[in-house]
Amino acid sequence: MISEVLQLILVWVGIYTVVNISLNVEYGYTGIPNFGRHFAVLMGAIAVGGILNRVLMKLLGVSGDLITGTTDLVSRADDLFAAHPVYGIAYLVVSLALAFTLGAVMGALFILPSSRLREDYLGMTLLAMAEVTFLITYYTPSIMGGYYGTSVPDPLAFLSGDSREWTFIGITTLLALLVYLLSERLLNTPFGRLLRAHRENETVVLAFGRNLMGIRINASIIGSGIAALAGVLYGFHALNLISSSFSRVEWTFYPFLMLLLGGRGNNRGIILGTAIFVTLKVLIETYKFQISSLLHLPFEPVWLEYILFGIMALLILYYRPEGLIKEGMIKTEPLKKREAGQ
Amino acid sequence: MGVFEGALTYANLLALLALGLTLTYITTAVPNFAHGSFAVIGSYLAYTLLAAYGVNPYLAVIPAFIVGGLIGTVVYQLTIKPLIRKGASVDMLMMATLAIDIILYGILGAYSDFLSEAFKRNASKFVFTNIDFTVGSVPGRVFVSTALVIGTLIGLYVLLYKTKFGIALRASMENPALAEAMGIDVEKTRLFSWFLAAALAGMVGAVLPFLQETVPGTGGFIIVSVFAASIVGGLRNIAGGLIGGYIIGFSESMVTYGLSDVLGTGVLVYGKVVSLLIMVAVLLLMPEGVTGTKLWRRLVG
Amino acid sequence: MLETEKVNAGYGKLQILFDVSVKAEKGKITTIVGPNGSGKSTFLKTAFGLTTVYSGSVKFKGKEITKLPPFKRTRMGMAYLPQTNNVFTNLTVMENLKMAGYILSEDEFRERLELALSVFPDLKKILDRKAGNLSGGQRQFLAMATAIVRNSELLLLDEPTAQLAPKLANVIFSKILEMRDDHGITVLLVEQNAMKALEISDKAYMLVSGRVFYEGRPEPLLTEEKFRKHFLGVVEELEVVEDGSV
């Protein structure tokens, strides 16, 4: 039991770290309040469940559509990967690459109408766009199985049981680490400073002749691309994709909560915030029946989870909006060298 | 029900919701992401009264108005006001309203589970359409929703133009600093705006299930249309909420009902696509909305 | 009426005023002039309570008000009229006046309204017009009328004639005189249009870089070269226009 809980915590820390870093790029650094973060994650899922599933079905000669044919697809693909692990890994890599591309492109498209918008309009617009996409995907089975859902093959089909789980955790953690390192690299540069300038004072940015819209598009491309990766990871964790999993609560509100908790604009803080939140969430979900009977709840514990995390967000906003770890200076290479030389 | 009647009902209700959203936006500078859930509170109140006492939901409009208003006041006093006092930025306030929406969603969900247990029937999804009255072939909700809009407009007119407090409210909405300098208690006008907006939402919520299926998450579903309506109408002016509500309400409904003959249910979603497209178009072409255009200013003078 | 003593003030951490001591006597018109950026507007804002005061004191009618919030100063009888945004553009003239009398009783309001309209009779004809549709001059009249309705004893006027044609500016100045002479209102005036303002003043101050450079009768500021050079540009322009030679 403990091992399972630990596995869940680790895999979710990995997945959410990726999402949260993506949100950090867009919101923490650039100041775009992307309340439609779940959109990009969904794009990642569509890349796998919508696009790649179809491609694989063609390649493997599976008949039917995304709903009727997936069982067949999954068994054939799993057999293939079990026999040839290389194909499994290739499938994983292709999924990630495709997801990133799709996420990046869609992210750029979706930020386009916001060229002249301030934060309040941005927040509303991005949320609206994400919600509508979410709804369309849910009600249109031809995209990704709609309300039936669709299964996806397991790239690690050559492993099973605990070794599969731990390997997957390893991959997720590795990817999260990669994303973390790359974003640190990216943000501790004049580009990072430019993003922050956008957040702090748009007028200054304009005065320096920079293009506001260009900054937003760049931030969205990177942010949405990264978020889509998380969608893939989640897909291979659950092995079953149904668009209702990509809700606003799970993939926008919780990431914002983690950002708030750890400290926005600050990647180290994000990891801390993610770890704390995920541990809480996994514990609540694992022991929900115990909690329910202990408190004699006349309702499903999931509602309590929403209420608790909502209250948590409000408390943080009021008492410690800067988060646990405060934002630091942007340390570009020259600065780092100077510090090291001291 | 004919397409036009359905559209009119929906547009009436949406206009009232957008009016409330715009009102709190103007007075407290934050788009309230929880506004839709305020309405659903009214829906569940109506359902409770129906299930427990057999009260017709239309009569529940009054308690829904009051309860909604109270909840709006509580939300404002406990969360928005303290955060504004602390100098919270717009994005933090938006996040707060998002958090409030999640909390309300949780409470409504929990409540619906509780109701299901108590009344031995499924309270997580309900609709009142089948108990609506008809006048000829026109369903009652058309009349009630229209009456609510007319009543609200009359009430607002009297309030805003014939009472000292109402004029002060208008003054505070335009220029809070100047109003403050005149000795007007601007804080009271803010509190009142949250009361009124939430009260209107609650009122709408009691009638909404006559039109569509209601679940605890309906608030999050409908907020998209409310945002679209407020943006299209123009967020600087409460008339914008009204106008935007009708534009979006009719467009959405026409598409939904028009297509349902062809595509069946689940088509509600595509109506929202239309709202989104209109919203995006407005943002690109006239970001201040209909009431922000020169044409409007000339008309109103 | 209003007295500041060695006030150091500014916006947040940015200090604008340095050891400013100014006295505006009851029933008199006091004018503050000075070059751009000298802190004249900031001084008025400080008197009303809109800035951060680091040290020094502000006294109104003998009472210490340095920490008092603006709306309380209004209730004490102080009226601050900024350059812009001094009326509610979406409200009618009458509604604006009603708002000015917000804290008054019905009878008090009627009395003050009559008084205000006697000083600005032009407003009687446009009571139902939206303030946003008024001309610049009419708006200033309305703003000053609201101050009278509020039973203000002290008027803080921030460049009331800015962007007004000279003829209109003269009307404003004569109204200011009327308010002092017929209604005993104390006026503290900040003006760029220095010449005319100084002509109607009882006392004058000149601020330069946030400090009091001159305090005393207004005449020397108009005649002595060493002072004139500090607001030479504006004064020259005015002279040319008033001569009618352009």
Image (tube, coloured by chain):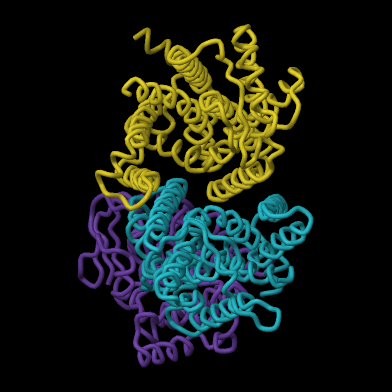
Q: Colour of chain B?
A: cyan
Regarding residue C116, the answer to whether it shows in the image is yes
Compared across the picture, whether A159 is left or right of C5 comes to right
| Residue at the image point whose x is 40% and y is 55% from the top | B113
Regarding residue C215, the answer to whether it shows in the image is no
Residue nearer the viewer, A125 or C130: A125
Position of residue C157 measured from the top left corner of the image (x, y, whole percent) = 43, 68
Position of residue A317 measured from the top left corner of the image (x, y, whole percent) = 36, 45
| Residue at the image point whose x is 66% and y is 64% from the top | B249
Residue nearer the viewer, C193 or A153: A153
Position of residue C80 measured from the top left corner of the image (x, y, whole percent) = 40, 68
Residue nearer the viewer, A122 or A227: A227
| Residue at the image point whose x is 71% and y is 74% from the top | B299
Compared across the picture, whether A301 is left or right of A248 comes to left
Q: Colour of chain C?
A: purple
**Where the C terminus of chain A falls, by quadrant?**
top left
Residue lying farthest to the front in this orientation? B120
| Chain identifier, yellow in the render | A
Q: Is residue A271 above or below residue A159?
A: below
